[in-house]
Image (cartoon, grey):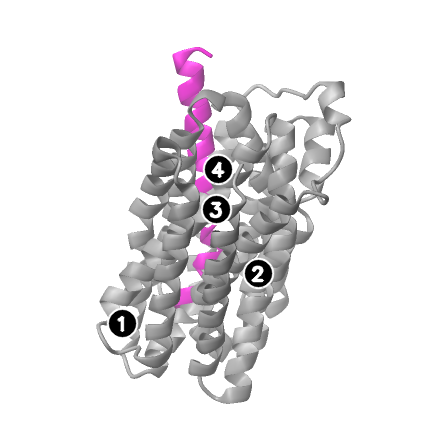
Amino acid sequence: MKPLSRALMMSALVLAAINLRPGITSLAPLIERIALELSLSRSLISLATALPVLCMGLLAPLAPRLAVRFGLERVITVCLALIGLALLARLGSRASPVLIGSAVAMGAGIAVAGPLLSGFIKRHFHDQMGRVVAWYSLSMTIGGAAGAVLTTPVTQWLDDRWHLGLAFWALPALLAVALWLCLPNRADSADEAARGGLPWGEPRAWLITAFFALQAGLFYALTTWLVARYHEAGLSLLRSNSLFSLFMLVGLPSAFVLPWLAQRFDNRYQLLLACGLISALCLGMISFQPTLLPEAWAALLGLGLSGSFALSLVLPLYEAHTPLAVSRWTAMMLFAGYSLASLTPVLAGLGRDLAGNYQVPFMIITCLALVMILLAWLLGRGRH
């Protein structure tokens, strides 16, 4: 590949990854305000986070089939356009059906793009996967952190209209579409396209999927309710939002460094175990002592959860040997993983409605982090 062509491919990958999270994380700073203004319960408003995650799971198996029929690069372009249009539709999200409907459309675009971007890495950067996945996961984390951190100031800049603050994130998505339209489209060979479906019979595929489901479930539950937990514990709304921003921002170096370390020292399973331990400890503190050194635990939690997510993205790349096979492993991981993960924000919101506080759902979330530790150990024990 020519240097200019490789630079263009890398820029397209980074910009696509940046757009996979802001539509979800941008809701967190505004969710209590939206719930009050639209008179929605916590369990119902959490659907705006849960439904995209559910779509990201249920629709992921379509990705390899669409790539075979239309070409990997062109399908990713269409997915980015769908994400951009869904975010643009949030201009009308003062009507709750529009807010929920845009979440479904956005989740559909993310669902298909995610597995195909892993295949894109395998196809164009097979000789430097660790470094490229580091940039990929960092870019995704940047997008998520930007949605969480910048939505409030953008909303204030736009005359404090929260629907404009949510719709603002359509701009980088449409920019990504313009760049991806410049990439050549390439179809897989008929022989490769005919090789099987998702790896349901592979025990390691199930272990990877279960680990991904737990870490994604933890992330989306925290994306939805972490600010509310801190605020309920007695911290000001300003400080609660700053802690959430810290949680998101500290994940940036973790998302970049850990995939690189995993390839450099071949220690990805030890790193997964360490991330699980850190996440469980921090969630325990937020559950039982949320006002004791909250900045320290929020920062460490960002390190642990962002690291576990970045390392999860690496795993299918080392289990499969062709771009389409990587897409299939990733599709299975996202299909079952996100389908299960989508339940955690809703169940946490329902737990808050039933228990009358956020401590009980956060105690359950801590238990899920302990199970994640066990799965990381099993993955390392059965490594290839």
SS at circle 3: helix
Q: Is residue 123 left or right of residue 299?
A: right
Q: Which residue is mark 3?
A: 380
Q: Amino acid at mark 2?
A: Ala
- Nearer the observer, disc 4 or disc 2? 2
SS at circle 1: helix
Contact between marks 3 and 4 (CB within 8 A): the answer is no
What x and y, as percent, mark residue 269? Answer: 44, 45
Front residue (pair 158, 111): 111
- Nearer the observer, disc 3 or disc 4? 3
Neighbour tally class for label 2: few under 14, some 14-19, many 20 plus, Cα within 10 Å: many
* Magenta extent: 1-29
Q: Is residue 161 left or right of residue 244?
A: right
Q: Amino acid at mark 3?
A: Gly
Front residue (pair 15, 230): 230
Q: Is residue 287 above or below residue 73?
A: below
Q: Which residue is mark 1?
A: 238
What x and y, as percent, mark residue 212? Answer: 53, 52
Is residue 248 visible to the viewer in this orientation of the structure?
no
Q: Which residue is mark 2?
A: 341
Q: Is residue 235 above or below residue 175?
A: below
SS at circle 4: helix
What x and y, as percent, mark residue 298? Answer: 30, 64
Contact between marks 4 and 2 (CB within 8 A): the answer is no
Per the model, the C-alpha gap separating discs 3 and 1 is 41 Å
Q: Is residue 68 left or right of residue 236?
A: right
Query: Which image quarter holds the C terminus?
Result: top right
